[in-house]
Image (cartoon, helix red, strand yellow):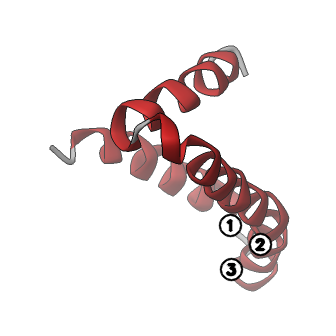
Amino acid sequence: MLCAGVYVCLTPIVLVDLLGLEKLSNAFGLVLLFQGIGAVAGPPFAGLYDNVFLQVLLLCCGIGIYAPAGQFNN
C-alpha cells in the first residue's frame, strides 16, 4: 500500500500527457469506472477460483508473476 499514493497522484498527470487537458475529465471518469468494476468483480472471481481449484497460493503467485510482466511490454 506504500505505492498507492504515487499511483493516485500520477494518474491525472499521465492522462493529461497522453490525451490532453481537454479530455482529462472523461478519461479520469473512465479510469475510475474500470477501477470500480475491478474492485466489485475481483473478490467474487477470486472466491470462485478458490472454491473451484482450492489453490489460492497458485492464484497469488500467478498474479505476482503476471503483474510485473506487463511492465516489459515495450
Assess whether mark 2 and mark 3 are in contact (beta carbons under 8 angstroms): yes
Taking the spot 61% from the left edge, 54% from the top edge, the residue there is 26
Q: Disc 1 versus disc 2: distance between alpha carbons?
A: 6 Å
**Which secondary structure, mark 3?**
helix
Q: Earlier in the sequence, mark 1 or mark 2?
A: 2
Q: Label 1: few (<14), some or many (≥20) within 10 Å?
A: few
Q: Is residue 1 above or below residue 37?
A: above
Q: Disc 1 versus disc 3: distance between alpha carbons?
A: 5 Å
The quadrant where residue 49 appears: bottom right
Residue type for callout 1: Gln
Q: Is residue 18 above or below residue 26?
A: above
Nearer the observer, 23 or 46: 23
In the rendered image, the quadrant that contains the C terminus is: top left
Assess whether mark 3 and mark 1 are in contact (beta carbons under 8 angstroms): yes
Residue type for callout 3: Phe
- Mark 1 vs mark 2, foreground winner is 2
Q: Which mark is residue 47?
A: none
The quadrant where residue 54 appears: bottom right
Question: x and y percent of residue 8 in the render?
Answer: 66, 26
Q: Which mark is residue 50?
A: 2
Q: Disc 3 versus disc 2: distance between alpha carbons?
A: 6 Å
Q: Disc 3 designates what residue?
A: 53
Question: x and y percent of residue 30 in the render?
Answer: 63, 58
**Which secondary structure, mark 1?**
loop
Tell me: 16 left or right of 17.
Answer: right
Q: Label 3: few (<14), some or many (≥20) within 10 Å?
A: few
Q: Disc 1 designates what residue?
A: 55
Taking the spot 57% from the left edge, 60% from the top edge, the residue there is 58
**Which secondary structure, mark 2?**
helix
Q: Is residue 17 above or below residue 56?
A: above
Assess whether mark 2 and mark 1 are in contact (beta carbons under 8 angstroms): yes
